[in-house]
Amino acid sequence: MSSWRTKKLKNLAQVLTAINNPKDMENFLRDVCTVEELDEMSSRWEIVVLLSEGKTYRDIADKTGVSTTTVTRISHWLNNGEGGYKAALKRK
């Protein structure tokens, strides 16, 4: 994919930002994602929160059951990505 900012992604982002009720969001996410995808995204967010709290990679891996490689990858995107994780943390 030459650009990840596709029209489809922009449409999805627009509908996600329009849903302002947590229950409605949970229902939408369940309709759009598999249980495995929801678990993966939820785990990634949990890792971001733990990283922001200063937890070690090993502690995070032990707590979440993911590899330290996964924690490292998420840390990279937290610190060098598009700023989405950091913006979401401010709203937490």
Image: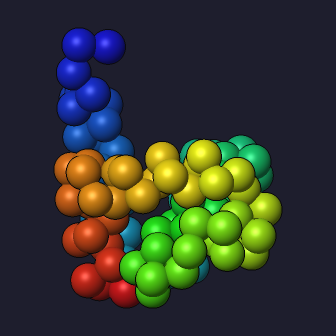
What residue is at 23 percent from the left and 13 percent from the top? Answer: 2
What residue is at 66 percent from the left and 67 percent from the top? Answer: 58
Position of residue 37 relative to residue 63, above or below, is: above
> In this image, 63 relative to 29: left or right?
right
| Residue 43 shows in this picture | yes
| Residue 21 shows in this picture | no
Residue 14, position as x, y percentages in the image: 25, 53
Residue 52, position as x, y percentages in the image: 40, 79
- Give 22 or 42, whichever is nearer the viewer: 42
> In this image, 26 relative to 6: left or right?
right
Residue 90, position as x, y percentages in the image: 26, 83
Residue 5, position as x, y percentages in the image: 22, 32
Residue 29: image quadrant is bottom right
Residue 85: image quadrant is bottom left
Position of residue 30 relative to residue 4, above or below, is: below
The mark total stands at: 0
Q: Residue furthest top?
A: 2
* Quadrant (top left, top right, bottom left, bottom right) of the N terminus: top left
- Give 87 or 32, whichever is nearer the viewer: 87
Position of residue 52 relative to residue 65, above or below, is: below
